[in-house]
């Protein structure tokens, strides 16, 4: 239990220190990167732990965001009630979708989840009576506790950091538990896992639903932060970005998911001087990481910390005496 607590404390301490030195605009980017980190930790359940290639993660983020937006603006619910309802509805939908979808493997599953994301975009763009179509849903009420509202970037950062810490702790506990080991066993060899008695269908659906729950939480945070949602915020390009964040940071690790989310959120701002050439640099970065750093930034850090072993020269055999 010590490691999860250390992760939570590190997130809160580093976040609070950054909030003291960063200007308002960079605080907004930090909030967005923390929200993305929650979603990427969720993707880590499916892809990093269970080996499920999902290209529809942004659809579940959108389900959470749209669920909260509709319940608060159309139905008049409080955000405190709308957020759990939106997350629960997304979890149920993920379970229903997962039963037929997870019969597929490899690139077939990737294409199916990509189709799910495209379908979500089409539905939200054309169901005008519910989602307002491409105009989006505005005037989402802010989250408040009494007279204190999470309206500014500083105030909202504390909310996001607490949620991110909680999600990271749950992910760390799951990784060390029997359920986490079952997920990684299914990822490494599904047939061997079935032979030793692991219910692979249950494990994959559990990982898929946990991934959707974290995505929905991130979607609720996004809706409360931006206070506006539109179909363009949850396209398949965003799903690919979430996957890139996980690969860059290091799949299968919590720290890697957070580092990847922060890096790829701030990278466009740091490379703004490149203009549209940023996309070329981004593609080149992904290629370099996939070829030379398949374990991501976390793997690079572990490689740098690992002491190099000195290879002692082999002893020279003495010549045999001749009679």
Image: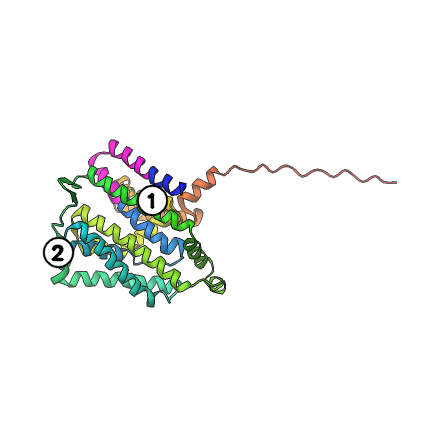
Name the front one of labels 2 and 1: 1
Identify the image quadrant of the C terminus: top right
Q: CA distance from mark 2 to mark 1?
A: 31 Å
Lateral position of residue 141 relative to residue 298, left or right: left
Q: Using the rendered view, name the quadrant where residue 271 is placed.
A: top left
Mark count: 2
Nearest the viewer among 107 and 161 is: 161
Query: Residue under circle 1?
Result: 258
Q: Name the residue: 34% across, 41% down.
A: 8
**Reading the chain from its start, which is encountered first: label 2 or label 1?**
2
Q: Position of residue 156 (x, y in %)?
A: 21, 41
Note whether 106 is above or below 158 in the view shown.
Answer: below
Q: Mark on residue 135?
A: 2
Magenta residues span 11-33
Asked which secondary structure carries label 1, the reply is helix
Identify the image quadrant of the N terminus: top left
Q: Position of residue 95 (x, y in %)?
A: 30, 63
């Amino acid at each position: 239990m010590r490691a999860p607590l250390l992760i939570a404390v590190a997130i809160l301490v580093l976040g609070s220190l950054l909030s003291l030195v960063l200007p308002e605009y960079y605080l907004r980017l930090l909030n967005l990167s923390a929200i993305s980190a929650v979603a990427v930790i969720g993707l880590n359940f499916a892809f990093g732990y269970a080996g499920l290639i999902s290209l529809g993660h942004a659809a579940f983020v959108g389900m959470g965001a749209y669920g909260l937006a509709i319940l608060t603006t159309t139905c008049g619910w409080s955000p405190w009630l709308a957020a759990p309802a939106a997350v629960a509805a997304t979890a149920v939908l993920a379970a229903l979708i997962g039963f037929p979808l997870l019969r597929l493997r490899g690139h077939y599953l990737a294409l199916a989840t990509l189709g799910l994301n495209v379908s979500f975009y089409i539905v939200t763009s054309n169901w005008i009576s519910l989602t307002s179509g491409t105009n989006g849903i505005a005037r989402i009420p802010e989250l408040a506790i009494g007279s204190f509202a999470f309206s500014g970037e500083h105030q909202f950062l504390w909310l996001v950091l607490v949620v991110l810490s909680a999600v990271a702790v749950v992910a760390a506990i799951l990784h060390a538990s029997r359920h986490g080991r079952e997920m990684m066993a299914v990822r490494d060899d599904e047939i061997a896992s079935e032979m030793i008695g692991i219910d692979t269908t249950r494990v994959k659906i559990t990982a898929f639903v946990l991934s959707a729950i974290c995505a929905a939480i991130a979607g609720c945070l996004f809706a409360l932060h931006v206070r506006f949602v539109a179909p363009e915020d949850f396209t398949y390009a965003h799903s690919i970005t979430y996957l890139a964040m996980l690969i860059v940071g290091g799949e299968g690790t919590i720290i890697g998911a957070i580092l990847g989310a922060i890096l790829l959120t701030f990278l466009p701002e740091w490379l703004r001087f490149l203009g549209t050439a940023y996309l070329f640099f981004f593609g080149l970065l992904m290629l370099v990481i996939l070829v030379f750093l398949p374990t991501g930034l976390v793997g690079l850090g572990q490689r740098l910390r690992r002491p190099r072993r000195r290879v002692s020269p082999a002893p020279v055999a003495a010549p045999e005496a001749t009679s």
